Image (cartoon, grey):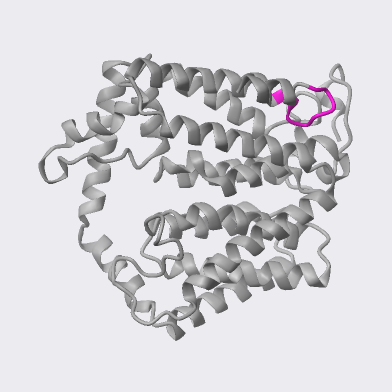
Amino acid sequence: PVAAWVLMSSSRNAAASLAPSALVTIATFSISHLVSGGPYGQLLKLIASALTLFVAASLARTSADFRAGALGLAAGVGLLAMRGMVGIQEVQLGVGLNPVEEVANKNYFSLLALPAIFVSGAWLLHGRPAWTDRVVLVLAVAACSLTIAGSANRSGWVSLAVVPILLFGRKASPRFLIGIATVAFVVMYGLEKLELLPVVEERIALTQAGYSSDELREQLYQAGAEIFLASPIYGSGLPRISDELAARVGGAFSEEIGPHSVVVYLLAGGGLFCTIPIVVFALRVVWPRFRRYELGSIRPRDEGLAWLLPRLGLLWLIRGLFSDEILYSPAFSMALGMFHGVTVWDSSFGGVKAVERRQPVGGMR
């Protein structure tokens, strides 16, 4: 962390302003792990996630850099999604498609696919994509969307449904409507062709009838609130949160379980001691221009894409309500870093010019 802070401290680096808040965040998380006596696997993953964001923010300086990053992220995750569909023979109800079944459960893929879909959609709908870009990005978005829809991951479904809303600008352009219709058609056709509709129908039926995982999630939220209220400053200690939750939930879920929510993980596990620094860091990532640029830069504009950065942060939060693993998602770190870096470096990307800090609010365009 110290070496990263030194490397990022140059005024010529887009990630320089993030270094102090990132260092404080890593320090508080480290203290929580040290006091709790480890293990330190999650701490190492958090540091790796922060460094991924730093590197992406440092390398993405122009719209061309953003385009290259979007194509790379979309192609990588898109190929992973296609790999999961190739040679599919029998789909297990309750699981559906899972391209990463060798290393993670069915819920993890959406942590990779959602930022790829968002970044791809941002460039397709609001950027200046070449025809080759459109081919690659549309294929990737369609493959990722179909894989999420064909999984039994309901939180992935909810987040996927939110993406078009977050990508919506001032008005529904023909490009936007055609894109949404195309992806929706591919998803519905793919679900039927790959015989994945029973997976979706079964999950919907279980949700309507009452599902054990819903009961568990409610108990986890309640237990997390109890832990936070018992120790609001330091929480239970991040490494001990799973054991604390398991002890309070008990019953059929008495085995060690995870918090299944970044909110529960931070507030109950780290208390305000860990939550406040990471919230400050997150705000600095998604609003890099809050002080130096017009407040209008966070609203939809006819030019630029920087107004989408806070919306990507909102997508992270929505998906994070159902997963604590989002803290370590390399795809989200890369996407946030790319957006942050090019927003700071390239004023044309934001569709807004810098203004003096002393300019009154009435002077905004």
Q: Which of the 4 quarters of the picture holds residue 101?
A: bottom left
Which residue is painted at 73% across and 61% down in the image? 125
Which residue is painted at 80% across and 34% down in the image? 344
Residue 15 among magenta residues:
yes
Q: Nearer the viewer, residue 5 or 287?
A: 5
Q: Residue furthest bottom?
A: 193
Residue 16 among magenta residues:
yes
Quadrant, the N terminus: top right
Q: Nearer the viewer, residue 354 or 361?
A: 354
- Rendered location of residue 13, percent (x, y): 80, 29
Height in image: 183 above or below 41? below
Give the magenta-colored segment's residue range: 10-17
Q: Residue furthest left?
A: 251
Q: Which of the 4 quarters of the picture holds residue 34?
A: top left
Q: How many numbered discs, if any?
A: 0
**Horizontal placement of 208 versus 274: left or right?**
left
**Horizontal placement of 177 versus 192: left or right?**
right
State whether residue 340 appears in this view: no
Quadrant, the C terminus: top right
**Horizontal placement of 235 versus 50: left or right?**
left
- Rendered location of residue 170, percent (x, y): 73, 53
Prevailing secondary structure of the magenta residues: loop
State whether residue 44 appears in this view: yes
- Rendered location of residue 201, percent (x, y): 32, 73
- Rendered location of residue 75, percent (x, y): 66, 64
